[in-house]
Amino acid sequence: MSGPIINKVANSPLITVDLEDYKTGGPRILIDVSQWLEDGFLLREKPFRAVLQKHDWTKYKDHYVAIDCTSKAVLPAWATLLITSYLTPYAKKIILGSLKDLEKQLFSNTISLLDLKAFENKPLMIKGCSDPSIPESAYIELVQRLQTVAKSLFYGEACSSVPLWKAKK
């Protein structure tokens, strides 16, 4: 005796939260300060300022920019601030650090602004196996925000989830 196949997952009140849906769109770029240093290590103020003045900053229009120095030269604080002053009219966001640091900050901003009304008193599944560029820290921040309003939290997929937390009754 077989009856109709019932999709229990589709009929479940479980809401899937996929961080891929919250990824900030737009190009990302790393600016390596060492490209403008003598031998990649030495900053001489006058030539440094001259090369920055000649640089085409318009190519960073609407970009998310990470400023870093891959040579690990010790830079005076004003060096990255000067670069920032040139980028500010064009870039959407500028951070000091790597592209991974930039992604962490973009997700952090998005998660902090997330409207939680749709998740109130609901069982939530935080989708796993998403885009590998989503930093683990984004999942941690998401759990912290959702736990303030959710009925329960799971991680993974509906067919193989890991329970994370349940509200006390």
Image (spheres, rainbow, N blue to C red):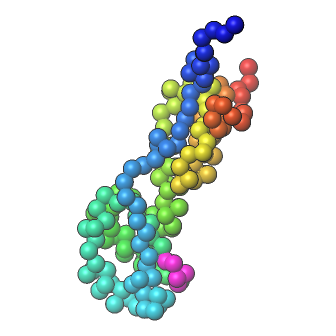
Given residues 121 and 100, the one toward you in this image is 100
Q: Residue at x 56, y 53 (%)?
A: 132
Is residue 72 inside the magenta stretch? yes
Front residue of 17/79: it is 17
Is 158 left, or right, of 112 in this rendering? right
Horizontally, residue 130 falls left or right of residue 109, namely right
Residue 8's quadrant in the figure? top right
From this view, report whether residue 72 is shown above or below residue 105. below
Tell me the residue at 46%/92% (across/down): 39
State the residue at coordinates (61%, 30%): 124
Q: Which residues are magenta?
A: 69-73
Residue 26 in picture, x, y percent from top left: 37, 54
Residue 3: x %, y % from top left: 63, 9
Q: Main secondary structure of the magenta part?
A: loop
Asked if the stretch drawn in magenta spans residue 124, the answer is: no
Task: Name which residue lies at 59% across and 19% down.
Answer: 7
Q: Is residue 106 above or below residue 145?
A: below
